[in-house]
Image (cartoon, rainbow, N blue to C red):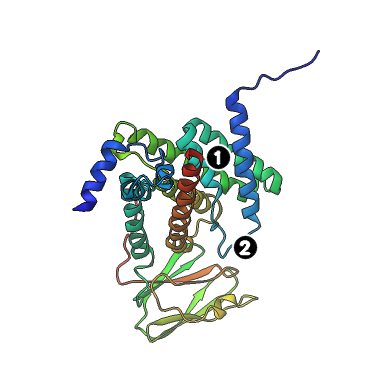
Amino acid sequence: MKLVLQTTREDHLIAWLTALAITIHIAESALPSPLPGIKPGLANVITVAVLIKYGWRTAAWVALLRVLAGSLLLGTFLSPTFILSLAGAVCSIGVLGMAAGLTRPFPGWRLGALGYSLLAALAHMGGQFWVAYTLFIPHPGLLHLLPLLMTAAVIFGAVSGIISAAMLKRIAA
Amino acid sequence: MQRGVAEDMDMNKDNDPHRSSSPLCKRGAGGGFCKKAAQGFATRADLVILALTLALLPYLYISYWGDAVQGEQARILVAGKEFAVVSLHDEQRLSVPGALGSSVLEIRAGKVRFADSPCHGKQCVHSGWLALGGEFAACLPNRISVQVVGREPRFDTINF
């Protein structure tokens, strides 16, 4: 008997978008970083674009699958890196969901790629930092890194947001 | 003034920032559309978020780096417990009993350092003088740490 997995259009969409995000994730992991925890997070471009174009559910799938598959490919699955990455992804997707839900009743205040991306970057860094602090290095000295880490998050969040906005424009055009 | 008008237009006509007007721009449908395309890049809410995050940063720097001024006291911990809090203005050499033996802390001219420690690597001694609030050195083998604090610690206890 032949087993046929029924796949929906949404499954295919998620798979394609996740593949795109994983590619960015892995390419980025080759870049050197001045401080552990600081990286551009360009895979966020995809998450934000997916959120705006296809909704939160698809974005959550893409973000979480990206972390899972990315860690398997990089060999960091279940390592601290993976746990930090997962914490960041869960936090950022949670904040994106809240932001999307909160702004839905107010059409004049709808967020665009830039706002979502900034929120996602800050949430990602916040979640990651919180886990690092509580789980791995509960040393008060770590808190002195927070301003630097958050500065990086704001800069990279804004950059990803602008890229994401540009990408959405190209898709729409 | 102009900005306010543009924003109103944005709100009435272009609620969806993702409905791009760049093709109109290319077709040369007028400067108004091009201007709008540039503005459609960030919605009003985006700008609010951007402002909030930019405001958050100075707050973080002040609250976590703000006490990076001349410290007033040295807080000495032995095995995680407070051993002593001494003023950085009282010049002295302090012998602190640790797990391996006594470490010597030297306090001079508003600074503190490990002058000697019975540990192997002497990492603590190599940390040198500490003077700024928040600066920290530790001799992990001897389980002694010293941190410079400002005049008044922000909290003495926190309860939940």
State the SS at label 2: loop
Give the x, y percent position of residue B24: 40, 42
Amino acid type at image mark 1? Ala
Give the x, y percent position of residue B122: 60, 78
Q: Chain of mark 2?
A: A
Q: Chain of mark 1?
A: A
Find the distance from the CA under tag 2 to the CA under tag 1.
Answer: 23 Å
Q: Locate residue A31 relative to residue B154 in the image: left or right.
A: right
Give the x, y percent position of residue A145: 47, 62
Amino acid type at image mark 2? Pro
Asked whether residue B61 is in view, the answer is: yes
Residue A63 is tagged as 1
Position of B113 relative to A70 (above/below):
below
Q: Residues within 10 Å of mark 1 (few under 14, many from 20)?
A: many
Residue found 56% across the figure and 43% down from its top:
A86
Mark 2 touching mark 1, by CB under 8 A? no
Residue lying at the far right of the rendered structure = A1
Residue found 36% across the figure and 76% down from its top:
B71
Residue B72 is tagged as none
Q: Which residue is tagged 2?
A: A32
